[in-house]
Image (cartoon, rainbow, N blue to C red):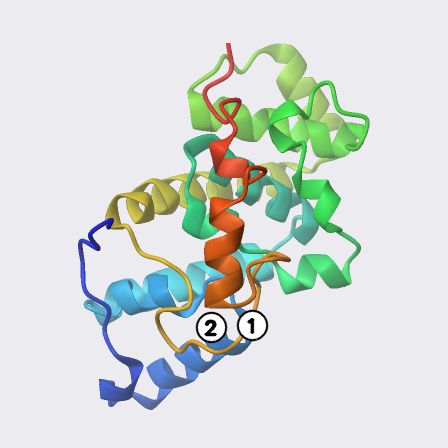
């Protein structure tokens, strides 16, 4: 068994009404789901720093939310953060992203699924995650499709996402452990604890794919 490294704070033991309300939002809306916030809740200022950043930069902000969602899951697949990589933004679903849009992210350059605008953001994300060269072509493509404000927000969001995911990966936290009983923001096939375990053990589980590694 994989050992969890930091305990969860039980939301029932929290006296702060606003913090309990945020846990309820995590339970019903996800991204983030309750487990990661139950770790951050050891330090309320850390809890709120992440919650407010995630709300204003990911759920809100100046850049297209669906673009940021693709970048978020690209990070997950790159660093193999299974906790984050199996979540899906409800807002992105309502704005048109479908499950197949997540399948080919690490092959985005050759894939026909993504348009030029999406590829420009994914190329930017890839460069940040893997410390690749940010040449003139990369920046020309970014400026073709995005304003400076959008480029700033996407870059900041990717940096926050990468740091959080690399950290959460070290903690061995898992889904359906805190405020269990809802499928908020879980990917199809992982809506319950039982389905989640089956999904992780399946031959087609994305984290088993050897291609999820640093690009050549």
Q: Give coordinates of residue 172: x percent, y percent.
A: 28, 50
Q: Which mark is residue 79?
A: none
- Residue under the image location 42 percent in, 51 percent down: 83
Mark 2 highlights which residue? 26
Label 2 element class: helix
Residue 110, by quadrant, is top right
Residue 192 horizontal side relative to residue 49, left or right:
right
Q: How many callouts does the rendering have?
A: 2
- Residue under the image location 67 percent in, 44 percent down: 67
Q: Give coordinates of residue 121: x percent, y percent.
A: 64, 32
Residue 96, by quadrant, is bottom right
Q: Is residue 124 above or below residue 52?
A: above
Q: Is residue 64 visible?
A: no
Number of other residues with Cα within 10 Å of mark 2, as a class: few under 14, some 14 to 19, many 20 or more: many
Q: Is residue 27 above or below residue 206?
A: below
Mark 1 highlights which residue? 29
């Amino acid at each position: 068994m994989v050992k969890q490294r930091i305990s969860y704070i039980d939301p029932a033991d929290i006296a702060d009404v606003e913090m309990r309300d945020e846990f309820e939002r995590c339970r019903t809306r996800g991204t983030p789901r309750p487990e990661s916030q139950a770790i951050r809740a050891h330090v309320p200022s850390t809890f709120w720093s992440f919650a407010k950043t995630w709300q204003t930069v990911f759920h809100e902000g100046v850049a297209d939310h669906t673009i940021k969602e693709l970048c978020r899951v690209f990070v997950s697949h790159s660093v193999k953060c299974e906790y984050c990589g199996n979540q899906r933004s409800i807002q992105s679903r309502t704005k048109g992203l479908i499950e197949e849009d997540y399948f080919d992210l690490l092959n985005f350059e050759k894939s026909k699924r993504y348009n030029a605008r999406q590829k420009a953001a994914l190329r930017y994300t890839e460069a940040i995650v893997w410390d690749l060269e940010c040449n003139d072509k990369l920046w020309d493509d970014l400026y073709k499709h995005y304003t400076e404000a959008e480029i700033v927000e996407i870059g900041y969001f990717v940096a926050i996402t990468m740091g959080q995911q690399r950290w959460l990966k070290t903690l061995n936290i898992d889904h359906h452990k805190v405020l269990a009983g809802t499928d908020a923001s879980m990917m199809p096939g992982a809506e319950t604890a039982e389905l989640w375990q089956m999904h992780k053990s399946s031959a087609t589980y994305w984290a088993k794919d050897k291609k999820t590694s640093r690009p050549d």
